[in-house]
Image (cartoon, helix red, strand yellow):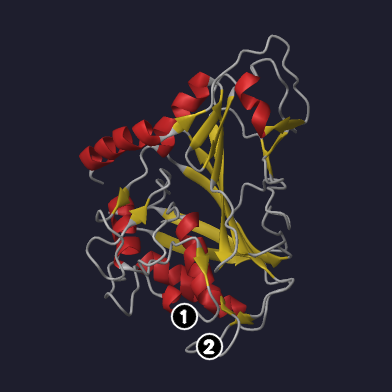
Amino acid sequence: MNLARVFSTALLIIGLTQVAPFVADESPECGDQLMAASLSGLDATGCDLHDAVVVLDDGRELPVPEPGEGISSWALTEDGMPEADDVSLYRDEAGNLALAVEDVFSGDPDAIEDLQSELAEEIIVGGSAPTTSKCSTSAPYNWSGHWWRLSAHEYRYSYNSAGAPSGASARITAAANAVANGTSGSCGNRNSALTIVREGTTTVYAGINAAGSRTGRSFVSEVSFGPIDGSYLAWACTYWALGGELVEADIKFDNSSRSWNTNASSCSSGYDLQGVATHEFGHAVGLGHVADLTSGQVMVKSTGTCNVGQRHLGRGDQRGLIAVYG
């Protein structure tokens, strides 16, 4: 990883982020539901937050992580529909909270500083103008600041086939292999040191409900299907420790109102499961969203039906994985 580039980019991003003003609250309310808007007035050091959740403005709930850990959440949206905010919640060693909703931070000042430092290692590489070339050497990528550091850079997950369309298992495996191997039929394969391993099957579901709220933690990464509200095709949710180490990553695909394409080589209708899964595995290993929807990268925030091109990484996606994993 190019630490000089990471550091210089971190300074730039810190300068561009917004921080909500902190107003000390002498009598904080430490209930089981903490409203996102109230975090900047909350001293949580004396709170029992073991079963508490933070309620976001869009209604999503994120469980308060253990001290020194954080949680991040992303959704992939249907083209042309409102996109969900990318969100990260962090709890520092003292017990205080910081929340990042896109580039707006709120919470305890010291916890915000930690979270900004964590997320400021994000790298957004690209030219000064949008690119329409999937394989452009200036195609953008976005690193979330987190990665699988131990055990030879392995992301290990278990698969729950309940409620999945016919043929889903093979398409999900192909998507994981594409991310691990840097596969691109358009740009040529560019491999990193990342490995993705399916450990087997499970009856446990990804801990994400229909509204995109995190519903619990199993300490094992699961990939599963279930109902998802609104225009969101899939959710990814990661747990991480301060310093960047990913410790759990769940993925959930909608099975309530979506028609999925699971054909190995073509698509006539529906959303392409392999392409969507390639995007979600990108989140699971540390890639964030890129805003440039014209770039042809897998990690854009929305997709349309039969987008089989999303099965193949763009040059930006590849460069992101290589920058993080070598």
Q: Is residue 132 visible?
A: yes
The residue at 39%/52% (across/down) is 153
Q: Quadrant of residue 224?
A: bottom right
Using the image as rendered, state which of residue 281 and residue 307 is in the foreground: 307
Pick whichever of labels 1 and 2 is earlier in the sequence.
Answer: 2
Q: Quadrant of residue 40?
A: top right
What amino acid type is highlighted by mark number 2?
Cys
Q: Quadrant of residue 287?
A: bottom left
Is residue 225 left or right of 293 when viewed as pictured? right
- Work out whether 57 lies above or below 316: above
Residue that sits furthest to the right in the current view: 31
Could you say where residue 271 lies in the image, as x and y percent from the top left? 58, 77
Could you say where residue 111 lies in the image, as x and y percent from the top left? 51, 24
What amino acid type is highlighted by mark number 1?
Val
The residue at 45%/25% (across/down) is 113
Q: Which residue is mark 1?
A: 308
Quarter of the picture containing the C terminus is bottom left
